[in-house]
Amino acid sequence: MLTSARNQFTGKVSAIESGAVNDEIDITLSGGDIITAIITRRSTASLGLSIGSEAVAIIKAPWIILANPESGVRLSTRNHLQGLVSAINQGAVNTEVEIKLPGGDKLVAIVTQESAMALGLAVGKPVSAFFKASHVIVGVSS
């Protein structure tokens, strides 16, 4: 699957909580990190999702919010991953930040240069990444 989204994580569906309109889908990555997605019940059915099935979680880099893990920041986002900054690419306005997750997966975030500087981001430093479950797109192989 080719998309413009930088973050594509393959994992196994580990939980499905059905609601009246939407389902909450947990996808466990090979390294143990869990990504939660909120999708419609119709999408759950049309994708054939079930516990143990393989799925891809897709998150666009600008949807990732970064924070210093020592700041004690708590957000209402369902997804909170921690890792180490593995690369920083500064542009004229924005900065691309690559984060290596404990299981080996790489997460990419796009933040403003001002935010990157305020957070003191540097290669090798720990960082927390937050994103909403409703920003996770779920796909399967056809």
Image (cartoon, rainbow, N blue to C red):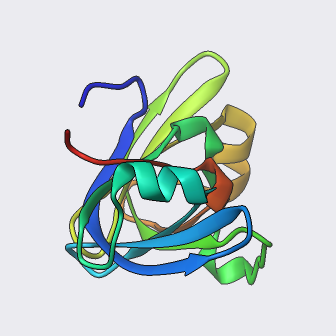
User: Number of labelled discs?
Assistant: 0
In the image, taking residue 127 as reference, residue 48 lies left or right, namely left
Q: Residue at x 24, y 68 (%)?
A: 53
Q: Residue at x 29, y 81 (%)?
A: 32
Q: How far from the left and from the top, in percent, is residue 141?
A: 20, 43
In the image, residue 122 sits, relative to residue 78, either above or below, namely above
Q: Quadrant of residue 20?
A: bottom right
> From this viewpoint, which residue is outermost toward the top?
92
Q: Quadrant of residue 99?
A: bottom left
- Image quadrant holding the C terminus, namely top left
In the image, taking residue 9 as reference, residue 44 lies left or right, namely right
Q: Nearer the viewer, residue 30 or 13?
A: 13
Q: Nearer the viewer, residue 69 or 58?
A: 58
In the image, residue 11 sits, relative to residue 17, either above or below, namely above
Q: How far from the left and from the top, in percent, is residue 111?
A: 64, 39
Q: Residue at x 24, y 77 (%)?
A: 52
Q: How far from the left and from the top, in percent, is residue 70?
A: 65, 82
In the image, taking residue 112 as reference, residue 27 lies left or right, namely left
Visible residue check, residue 28: yes
- Image quadrant holding the N terminus, namely top left
In the image, residue 108 sits, relative to residue 69, either above or below, namely above
Visible residue check, residue 67: no
Q: How far from the left and from the top, in percent, is residue 2?
A: 27, 25
In the image, taking residue 76 as reference, residue 94 lies left or right, namely left
